[in-house]
Amino acid sequence: MSDCPLWRERRFSTYWAGQAVSQLGDRVSELALPLIAVTMLHASAPVVGLLTAAVWAPNLLSLIVGAWVDHRDRKRSLLIGADLLQAVAVLSLPVAHAFHVITIGQLFAVALVAGAGGVLYQTAYPTFFVSLVRREQYLEANSLLSGTRSASFIVGPALGGGLVQLLTAPVAMLVDGVSFLVSALLISRVEVYETAVVRDESGDRLLRRAREGMRFLVHHPYLRASLACATTINFFGFVVSALLILFASRSLGLSAGVIGLAFGIGATGGLLGAVLASSAARVFGVGRVIAAGAILFAGPMAFIPLAGGTVWSRAAVLAAVEFVSAFGVMLFDVNLNALQTAVTPDDMRSRVAGAFSTVNYGIRPLGAIVGGVAGQLIGIGPTMVTAAIGGSLSFLWLLRSPIITTRTIDELEPVRG
């Protein structure tokens, strides 16, 4: 067993590099895709909400995909395939733009196909992760990976905003397409030992495994509470997410470059949160930090509609809100991901991940649709304030669960629900 820091271990550092490149590309697309709809195709709030929903709609099938993935031996190959699928979808946009045939229909198709690739990746990832790092490295690995994700939120939006202004939004999508190709290449170079799967040959095995994954999730005291908390955050978070770029562009009057800069500055809070997440857990306990992260993640969004004054003061409010929210989400994600990994048995990981994503990510399209419709009916500002309050109350799900009293990951063991 090596005593060197995890980031110096070749297998992990190779995967980490691929993840870093892919995350950077994702941040560009998250800004560019809705900007294509808003600035080039003049989409309304409900249409932007539906487009956001389309990205996450494939997660409704995560339960079935997870059950299928659980019985595949080569999870690394599935990660590579998922990256390639997403690359093809994203790269179709700059190609269509070059021939002046880009449409809102294509945006929806790209969102759905790329979303499906994301579902395949996230259901295969948990089993791959435990073959990549040791149990005592879970928190360190999650901190490093989350730190990279946070760094991508610093560089990516500013890069994306600049590329959109210089080259147009569809051309900026090239960055994300290439990033998926680089990620696939680097994952193909990561050698891991993957335990062979014992297959059940009964005729209804896929649906039965899917039911087992959902049953395990809803009866497990840790996983059930974490699911309820995360799902509440995601619903209200995507009410806001569906409207955020639209509000920043039209209501605050900010350009793509200024929006990207504000998001990039705000994302430094996520990097700080990723760095401090493990230390905070050691001082205050894993459960309390998860609860605090949930409140800090959602609550600040209520202040965005209060932005006013000059362009730069409006951008400063947006950046400050993003800073606190990003700090909170890293406290939440790093510790919750480590906790879930510690309490889930190896033979259930993909099924549990699929069941969790079906509910947790599957609620995101509903939140985005509600956000778009509510923004049209009652106004974007009131909708964002209401969603921020609702999301910040998600910590209440943790108070009657064993999560809130959990101090360290070391005290946890994989258990049946």
Image: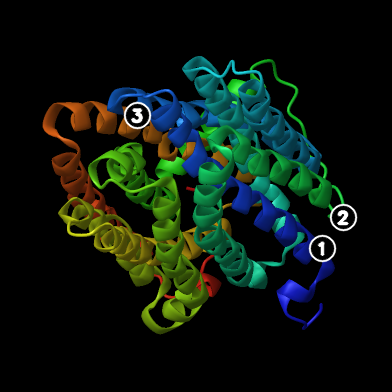
Residue 385 vertical placement versus 132 (above, below):
above
Q: Residues within 10 Å of mark 3 (few under 14, many from 20)?
A: many
Query: Dividing the picture into quarters, in which one does residue 41 lie?
Result: top left
Give the residue number, with chain letter if any, for mark 1: 11
| Residue in the foreground of this view, choosing between 1 and 236 | 236
Residue 414 appears in the figure: no
- Image location (x, y in percent) of residue 4: 77, 82
As helix, strand or loop, the secondary structure at mark 3 comes to: helix
The answer to which of marks 2 and 1 sits earlier in the sequence is 1
**Which label lies toward us, 1 or 3?**
3
Residue 19 has which mark?
Answer: none
Residue 49 has which mark?
Answer: 3
- CA gap, disc 1 to disc 3? 39 Å
Q: Give the side of residue 208 with respect to residue 219, left or right.
A: right
- Image location (x, y in percent) of residue 59: 50, 31
Residue drawn at (82%, 63%), measured in percent from left and top?
Answer: 11
Q: Give the side of residue 193 with respect to residue 411, left or right.
A: right
Residue 5 vertical placement versus 131 (above, below):
below
Q: Residues within 10 Å of mark 2 (few under 14, many from 20)?
A: some
Q: Are marks 2 and 1 in contact (CB under 8 Å)?
A: yes
Query: Dividing the picture into quarters, in which one does residue 242 lie?
Result: top left
| Amino acid tagged 1 | Arg
Q: Give the side of residue 308 with respect to residue 245, left or right.
A: left
- Image location (x, y in percent) of residue 283: 41, 84
| Amino acid tagged 2 | Glu
As helix, strand or loop, the secondary structure at mark 2 comes to: loop
- Image location (x, y in percent) of residue 130: 70, 57
Give the residue number, with chain letter if any, for mark 2: 191
As helix, strand or loop, the secondary structure at mark 1 comes to: helix
The answer to which of marks 3 and 2 sits earlier in the sequence is 3
